[in-house]
Image (tube, helix red, strand yellow):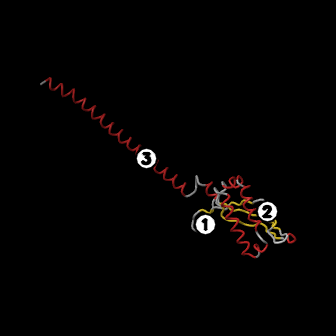
């Protein structure tokens, strides 16, 4: 019995020590969980705030916002890019040599993207040739009135889009037109 009593006394302090370590371990585990939860919540709040700031335009989208305007439907409006062709001066097709008529015009092409300008410049001789060939076949009566100018615009647009395969020409504008 004495031996059993000694064993109980020896095991009792070990039990107290084990219990003490257990409570410290539980407290340490609870504090670690709190730290992890607080850390995760902080990260979620920071990421949510950053996303809200980005989508409201406070950060990140300033370059895009400066370069584009929004239309009434809320979609960005792309500004047209204009390219002025060299001045055309051609003699028109006339019945007699004594009635020589000339056309002097400056044509402006409207394209959608700035990236199309080098493509136009690279194919400029082909484009000028196509327009000159068409203009030389015109008679002065072909250019009479606004209907004549509209036909001229449509024909130049058609020829420009054929000459510039990689570029979409949206419109043809006239800076000046003189028929003499």
Q: Earlier in the sequence, mark 2 or mark 1?
A: 1
Give residue 40's mark.
3
> Mark 1 touching mark 3, by CB under 8 A?
no
> In the rendered view, would you say 3 is above or below 73?
above
Q: Is residue 141 left or right of residue 7?
A: right
Q: Kindly indicate the quadrant of the structure image that contains residue 25.
A: top left
Distance from the alpha carbon under mark 1 to that under mark 3: 41 Å
Please provide percent x and percent y for residue 139: 78, 71
Please provide percent x and percent y for residue 114: 67, 56
Residue drawn 16% across the image and 26% down it? 5
Label 2 Cα crowd, 10 Å radius (few <14 / some 14-19 / many 20+): some
For mark 1, what is the residue?
Answer: 71
Label 1 Cα crowd, 10 Å radius (few <14 / some 14-19 / many 20+): few
Residue drawn 43% across the image and 49% down it? 41
Q: Earlier in the sequence, mark 3 or mark 2?
A: 3
Of badges 2 and 1, the one in the foreground is: 2
Image quadrant where one finds the C terminus: bottom right
Is label 3 in a helix, a strand or a loop?
helix
Label 3 Cα crowd, 10 Å radius (few <14 / some 14-19 / many 20+): few
Please provide percent x and percent y for residue 16: 26, 32
Of badges 1 and 3, the one in the foreground is: 1
User: Is 30 in front, or is 135?
Assistant: 135
> In the rendered view, would you say 81 is above or below 149?
above
Q: Is residue 116 left or right of residue 7?
A: right
Of badges 3 and 2, the one in the foreground is: 2
Is label 2 in a helix, a strand or a loop?
strand
> Mark 3 touching mark 2, by CB under 8 A?
no
> Mark 2 touching mark 1, by CB under 8 A?
no
Residue drawn 75% across the image and 62% down it? 133
Give residue 88's mark.
2
Is label 1 in a helix, a strand or a loop?
loop
User: Is 40 in front, or is 59?
Assistant: 59
């Amino acid at each position: 019995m004495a031996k059993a009593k000694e064993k109980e006394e020896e095991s009792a302090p070990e039990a107290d020590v084990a219990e003490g370590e257990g409570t410290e371990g539980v407290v340490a585990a609870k504090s670690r969980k709190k730290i992890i939860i607080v850390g995760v919540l902080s990260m979620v709040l920071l990421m949510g705030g950053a996303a809200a700031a980005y989508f409201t335009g406070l950060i990140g989208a300033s370059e895009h916002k400066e370069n584009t305007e929004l239309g009434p439907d809320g979609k960005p409006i792309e500004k047209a890019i204009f390219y002025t062709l060299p001045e055309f001066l051609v003699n028109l097709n006339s019945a007699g040599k004594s009635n020589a008529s000339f056309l002097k015009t400056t044509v402006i092409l409207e394209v959608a993207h700035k990236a199309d300008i080098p493509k136009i410049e690279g194919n400029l001789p082909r484009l000028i040739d196509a327009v000159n060939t068409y203009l030389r076949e015109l008679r002065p009566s072909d250019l009479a009135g606004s209907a004549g100018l509209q036909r001229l615009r449509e024909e130049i647009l058609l020829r420009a889009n054929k000459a510039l395969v990689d570029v979409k020409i949206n419109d043809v504008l006239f800076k000046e037109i003189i028929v003499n």
